[in-house]
Amino acid sequence: MPHIVDPAKCEGCEACVPTCPTNAISMVDAKAKISEECVDCGTCIEACPTSAISPP
Ligand code: SF4
Ligand code: SF4
């Protein structure tokens, strides 16, 4: 299961996007979206200034 983005908390800063080793994060309608390519490493959580990303 991929990590989860809370769209209510995501401010669309894109800071998480380049931190993902599998390029699983894309921006959709100015919100981060995590695909099935996610390997649950947790790196993106540390990059998010609004704590919008959570483990599955
Ligand atoms: S948990 Fe790791 S693999 Fe999954 S989206 Fe975040 S950085 Fe990418
Ligand atoms: S770092 Fe957080 S606020 Fe910024 S785009 Fe990613 S999920 Fe959204």
Image: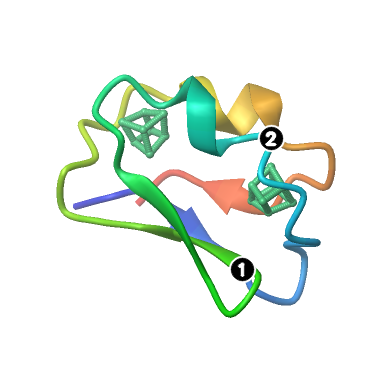
The quadrant holding residue 22 is top left
- The picture places residue 30, in percent across and down from the top left corner, at 65, 71
Q: Residue at x 59, y 32 (%)?
A: 45
Residue at label 2? 15
Assign a secondary structure to mark 2. Answer: loop
- The picture places residue 20, in percent across and down from the top left corner, at 40, 27
| 46 sits left or right of 20 in the view | right
The quadrant holding residue 10 is bottom right
Distance of label 1 from label 2 (alpha carbons): 11 Å
Query: Does the numbered disc 2 mark a residue whose Cβ is under 8 Å from ligand 2?
Result: yes
Q: Is residue 56 above or below residue 43?
A: below
Residue at label 1? 31
- Name which of mark 1 and mark 2 comes first in the sequence: 2
| 14 sits left or right of 3 in the view | right
Q: In this view, does 45 lie above or below 12?
A: above
Q: What residue type is labelled 1?
A: Lys
Query: Does the numbered disc 1 mark a residue whose Cβ is under 8 Å from ligand 2?
Result: yes
Q: Which residue is drawn at 77% across and 65% down?
A: 9
